[in-house]
Amino acid sequence: MSKINLNWRHNQIFMAGLIAVALFIVGGLVNASFLSPTNIGSILSMAVLLGFAAAGQTLVVIAGGEGIDLSVGAVMSLGAVLAAQTMAGQNSNIVPALLLVILSGATIGLFNAAGILYARVPPLVMTMAMANVVTTIQLIYTHGSPVGMPAPIIAFIGSRRLFPFLPWLVVLGFIILFLMQFILRRTVYGQQLYAIGSNYNAAYLAGVRAGTVKGIAYILSGILSSLAGFWLIAYNNFVFVNMGAAYVLPSVAAVVIGGTSLAGGEGSYTGTLIGSVILTALASLLVVLHTDEAGRQIINGLVLILLLALYTRQPAIRQ
């Protein structure tokens, strides 16, 4: 039965990959420039940013317990603000900026974990409330007008390309993919994360410190979301208030489209990255079709509903 679940997950990833390829083919038929190395590189760069935002979301969803982190966008925004103001365009400030970004993300993740595990606040409510708190802190800290810019080296990685179709940001994406897959597949923590997502009580009775494992997932989500904000300003080369807000729901959609079960216990970061490519390619295709903003939002929503309905189907026989 576990083999059936494994095959189902692999089929979802394979189907997601086919959809991603189909979107590029359709885009190329509509406009040949869609398949230009420059445009492909741009799509992949934006997909990496979304994938980075969805990295922590992947861990939280795999952990189960109806876990979804709605504070991702707010934490990204705060990470971007802190990174820009700390770096202030100086390479010598990169390390302090990274440490501050990681510390802020870990702190927010710790508060989320404490509220969910000890105060028994539902994850959706806790992370939504935390998003409001973080957004307010960001507005007070910046007075609504954040300043600063990324260091030259960081801006180079975020905006330059190794080849026309291969931005440095995509190289960073492969590094993130390797690290995430290593954590999920090759570490004791990863095995325990899948275990509590599949059956929390059984994992606890088997000796897994289930609460600690789940708490770490939220802390890592905070850190990864904050780091996503760090690289978001590297790509844009500027900072503004709430610049990560648009990544909240797409981060969830990318996770689910990539084959991670909202019930927990199943999924991979490879699938999440493919889901990110699908969402980014779809958005780019709608721009090529000269769809206005309202039309893009409607079509995006309808397609997401269709994809989520397709990929959240579960096999008839569960583990």
Image (cartoon, rainbow, N blue to C red):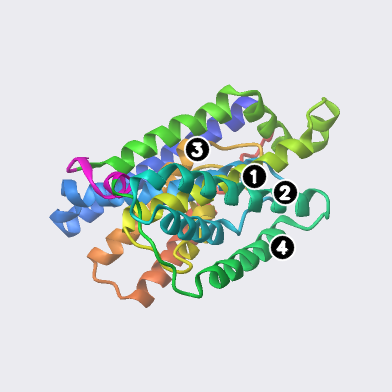
Front one among 97 and 59:
97
- Asked whether the beta carbons under mark 4 and mark 2 sit within 8 Å of each other, the answer is no
Spatial CA span between label 1 and label 3: 17 Å
Tell me the kind of residue under disc 3: Tyr
Upstream in sequence: badge 1 or badge 3: 1
Q: Residue at x 67, y 35 (%)?
A: 317
Tell me the kind of residue under disc 1: Ile
Name the secondary structure under disc 2: helix
- Asked whether the beta carbons under mark 2 and mark 1 sit within 8 Å of each other, the answer is yes
Residue depth check, mark 1 versus mark 3: number of the one nearer the observer: 1
Spatial CA span between label 4 and label 2: 12 Å
Image position, residue 48 (x, y; %)? 38, 46
Name the secondary structure under disc 3: helix
Say which residue label 1 marks: 219
Residue ranking furthest to the left: 32
Upstream in sequence: badge 2 or badge 1: 2
Mark 2, Cα crowd under 10 Å, few <14 / some 14-19 / many 20+, is many
Say which residue label 2 marks: 113
- Asked whether the beta carbons under mark 1 and mark 3 sit within 8 Å of each other, the answer is no
Upstream in sequence: badge 1 or badge 4: 4
Say which residue label 4 marks: 125
